[in-house]
């Protein structure tokens, strides 16, 4: 989803993937090649998914921190946890204000 001209919102949903870290890491060379873009990555894990707490799942968070430090405002990472049995989603508290900011910017631009 394009939030603004050069800001994208990406949703990566982990299913049976055993390497969630690569789903984070693949964005680094993309952002290096597209210096005018910024990305908000929402990384969704199933509550009882093995990959969420695996070493590669933890590595995904570590990589995201390194990318945020290097790419600064061009990369944001939010990890959410979905419980398919209840439909509850954890981790959206910090994401909601960021998305609201983009919505406000879109509303101002459409006037």
Image: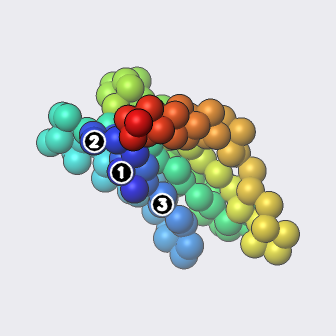
Q: Where is residue 55 in the image (x, y as percent from the top left)?
A: 57, 52
Q: Which residue is drawn at 84% across and 69% down?
A: 86
Residue nearer the viewer, 30 or 56: 30
Mark 1 and 2 residues: CB-CB less than 8 Å, in contact? yes
- Ranked by sequence position, the earlier of labels 2 and 3 is 2
Mark 3 Cα within 10 Å, few/some/many (few <14, many 20+)? some
* In front of the other: 47 or 12: 12
Q: Which quadrant of the rendered structure holds the C terminus?
A: top left
Tell me the element at label 1: strand
Instruction: Say above or below: 109 vs 29.
Output: above
Residue 78 is labelled as none
In this rendering, which labeled residue sits more in front, label 3 or label 1? Answer: 1
Residue placed furthest toward the right: 86
Q: Distance between the residues labelled 3 and 1?
A: 15 Å
Mark yes or no: residue 62 visible.
Answer: no
Please give the residue where the numbered disc 2 appears in the rendered image: 5
Q: Please state if 37 lies on the left or on the right of 67 as rendered.
A: left
Q: Position of residue 15 (x, y in %)?
A: 56, 73
The mark that comes first in sequence, 3 or 1, is: 1
Q: Where is residue 47 in the image (x, y as percent from the top left)?
A: 74, 63
Q: Quadrant of residue 82?
A: bottom right
**What's the mark number on residue 2?**
1
Instruction: For residue 87, say whether it is visible.
Output: yes
Q: How many marks?
A: 3
Which corner quadrant holds the N terminus? bottom left
Secondary structure of residue under mark 3? strand
Vertical placement of 15 versus 79: above or below?
below
Image: 76 above or below 46:
above
Q: Pointer 2: residues within 10 angstroms few (<14), some, or many (20+)?
A: few
Q: Name the residue under label 3.
A: 12
x 82%, y 74%: residue: 85
């Amino acid at each position: 989803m394009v939030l603004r001209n050069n800001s994208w919102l990406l949703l990566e949903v982990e299913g049976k993937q055993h390497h969630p870290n690569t789903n984070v890491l693949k964005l680094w060379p993309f952002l290096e090649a597209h210096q005018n873009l910024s990305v908000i990555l929402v990384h969704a894990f199933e509550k009882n998914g093995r990959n969420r707490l695996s070493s590669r799942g933890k590595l995904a968070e570590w990589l995201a921190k390194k990318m945020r430090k290097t790419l600064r405002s061009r990369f944001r990472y939010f990890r959410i946890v979905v419980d398919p049995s209840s439909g509850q989603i954890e981790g959206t508290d910090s994401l909601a204000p960021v998305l609201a900011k983009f919505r406000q910017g879109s509303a101002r631009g459409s006037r």
